Each structure stands twice: as structure tokens, then as C-alpha cells.
Image (cartoon, rainbow, N blue to C red):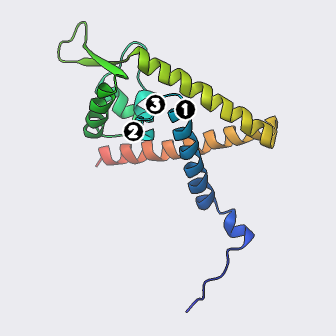
Amino acid sequence: MKIYEKPEETDIKNIGKLINTWKRFFDDWAYEQLNFHGYDYFKMGYMPFIMNISKNGSTNKDVAMEAKVTKQAMSKVVKELLEHELIKIEKHDTDARVSLIFLTQKGKNLINDTKKCVNSLGDEYAKLVGDKNYQIMINSMFKIVKHHESKTHNKTLQFKNI
């Protein structure tokens, strides 16, 4: 039977633990910023949806695909975003079967406030680790995300071919 031992320094730098801790700190920071700007009702789970609504309007299907969620999950979030008056829905000009999702002015304000806050956080991180290290981190994170997206895309293609 193994007795619990205090984690070593190398255990603290474990990538899983770091990602989990950073995500928790980021979420706490984001909720604090959202509350400060008057969006105390906003859930972080809304972000992938609202950030993928095109200026020219987007369909449920398009936003769900970009947010990487099912259309069923999308429907629930659309309902909540409508209740908070962050989005509006309009019929498509040429295809009456299709509805388009648009950001309201309140939704656009949320996006602008969010971008300012995230840019400010990026500036804080750049000061903390230096501009060069910050850019290396961002580029590395981007490459890792693209790696996982390509693996996910390949799995989707494999399942479609079965």
C-alpha cells in the first residue's frame, strides 16, 4: 500500500494540473470582469456561442458547428441568450425555413467589453513573462489547439466513413 506523499515540484508542474488550475483562475477572473461590467447573469458556457455569431447573422446549425456542440445544446443556450436580450432572431430574406441569429446592441457591447478585458489580461501576462515569452506561449497554445482540432476532425471523418 502506497502512503500519500507531498507532491514534488515536478508534480506541481504537471500539464494536467496546470491547465486545470489556469482554467479555474481564468473562469474566476472572467466572472469578476463580467460582474464588474454588469453581466452578472452571464455564464461562461455562453461564450462559445455568442463569439461565433457573424455580423451578417448565423444559423443555429452554423453556430453549433463553430461552438462544437449539438443543435440540442444550442437551442437551450439560444433561449437563454434571447431572455437576456443578447441576441435576436430574424427570418432569412430568401429562405423562410431558415432563421438567423444576430447580436443585439447589448450583445455587441458584451463582446466589446469582453475583448477589452481579455486584451488587458494578455497585456498583464506579457508584462509578467515578457513579450517574447508571451508570444511563444500564445503560438504554442495555438499549435496545440490546432493539433487537437485536426485529430477531432479526422475522427469525425472516420465515423462518417463507417
Q: Is residue 98 visible?
A: yes
Hey, what amino acid is under mark 3?
Tyr
Cα–Cα gap, marks 1 and 2: 29 Å
Hey, what amino acid is under mark 1?
Phe
Residue shown at 67%/78% (left/top)? 6
**Image mark for residue 68:** 2
Residue 49, picture quadrant: top left
Residue shown at 43%/42% (left/top)? 153
Q: Of marks 2 and 3, which one's residue comes earlier in the chain?
A: 3
Q: What crowding class fits label 3: few (fewer than 14 Cα within 10 Å), some (14-19), or many (20 or more)?
A: some
Picture coordinates of residue 122, whole percent (x, y): 68, 34
Q: Relative to 120, is 146 on the left or the right?
A: left
Q: Relative to 39, is 95 on the left or the right?
A: left
- Badge 3 is on which residue? 39
Residue 42, picture quadrant: top left
Q: What crowding class fits label 2: few (fewer than 14 Cα within 10 Å), some (14-19), or many (20 or more)?
A: few
Hey, what amino acid is under mark 2?
Lys
| Callout 1 secondary element | helix
Cα–Cα gap, marks 1 and 3: 7 Å
